[in-house]
Amino acid sequence: MKIIKIPCSSANIGPGFDVLGLALTMYLELHVFIHPSWPQSAPFNVTLEYEGEGEEEVDLRPDQNLITRVALYVLRCHGQATFPAQTVVKVINNIPLGRGLGSSGAAVVAGVTLGNEVGKLGLSKLHILDYALMVERHPDNVAAALFGGFVVTFLNELKPEDMARRDIPKSEILPEKIHEEMGAEPAKPPSGIAHYRKLPFAREIKAVTIIPNFEVSTAQARAVLPKEHIMKDIVFNFQRIPLLTIALGESPPNPTDIYQAMQDRILALATHNFEKIAHAIIDEFKKENIVCDWKLLQPAEDGATVIEC
């Protein structure tokens, strides 16, 4: 059996919109094994089981579930139309869906890693990132989940033909209908879609994570953002990003530097008293009849891992 473990992530840290991401210690796990007594007739040779967050709503059909759809995309890119016979994938998910903790990014990274493992493809983590970015187009969450820790990312400028491949619509990468006899291989990603660097993060700093009781998709959240920004607000954010990347890595941390550097005017919080901070924020939400939970998380330094059992 193999266990694939992917951390959740928080992105858009402070002024670092679409740039800074942080992996945190809440995980999506896949337990993958071949079961000799399992039915030979399972669609795409895979049986999917699921427990944890979202178990009442997640589709377990392999051509509809995000994790297995991504895995099938990766396999088809390498001439493999199905999983190995009698594959069982048990998903244990602790990441709340649609709550800003990178649940879809974790699922995509899990799917690419799953395809890589069952197909024995030998993809490097950098190329796993390329495949993930064909589906999840924001590198901050994906890179944090894949490489772990505190990361800075950006999309590379590619040759025009590579840009064309990178920008193929997601509907073509993950078509609504997949069948085992599909002919041509899907478009493979170009190499080097994004660049990332892992940054230091002070061990004293923890993340107070506020989790609302409703879901908001990335598309919905981005739909409310203004389409244009005034120059002084853009400059305001640019001025603070360098300080933030330094301040979060300093030990002992300087709270004043962190507070100043976390200010943001594009997306319009930070002491050791985590519980007090969480409840103060939750009380503000309650005034608007919004119910929340909270968790105290730490940076997940390892990123995506595969454990042989």
Image: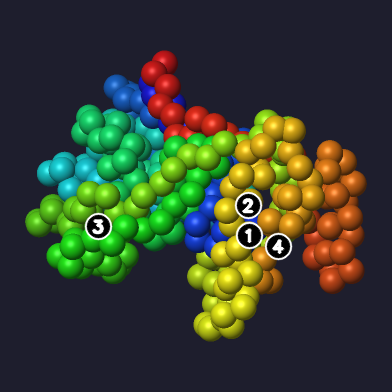
**Mark 4 vs 2: CB contact within 8 A:** no
**Horizontal relation, residue 147 to residue 228: left or right:** left
Q: Check disc 1 and report its element: helix, strand or loop.
A: helix
Front one among 212 and 165: 165
Instruction: Report the residue at 54% width, 77% height from top.
Output: 223
Q: Considering the image in quadrants, where does the C terminus appear?
A: top left
Instruction: Report the residue at 39% width, 60% height from top.
Output: 137
- Residue reaching furthest to the left: 183
Q: Check disc 2 and report its element: helix, strand or loop.
A: helix
Which-is-in-front pick, marks 1 and 3?
A: 1
- Which label's residue is closer to the chain start, 2 or 3? 3
Q: Check disc 3 and report its element: helix, strand or loop.
A: loop
State the CA–CA distance, disc 3 to disc 4: 45 Å
Residue that badge 4 annotates = 263
Q: Check disc 4 and report its element: helix, strand or loop.
A: loop
- The residue under label 1 is which amino acid type? Arg
State the CA–CA distance, disc 1 to disc 3: 46 Å
Q: Is residue 118 above or below residue 70?
A: above
Count of marks overlaid on the render: 4
**Horizontal relation, residue 67 to residue 24: left or right:** left
Judge the density around disc 2: few (<14), some (14-19), many (≥20) Cα neighbours within 10 Å: some
State the CA–CA distance, disc 4 to disc 1: 8 Å
- The residue under label 2 is which amino acid type? Leu
- Which label's residue is closer to the chain start, 4 or 2? 2
Residue that badge 3 annotates = 178
Judge the density around disc 3: few (<14), some (14-19), many (≥20) Cα neighbours within 10 Å: some
- The residue under label 4 is which amino acid type? Gln
Residue that badge 1 annotates = 240
State the CA–CA distance, disc 4 to disc 2: 11 Å
Residue that badge 2 annotates = 243
State the CA–CA distance, disc 2 to disc 3: 47 Å
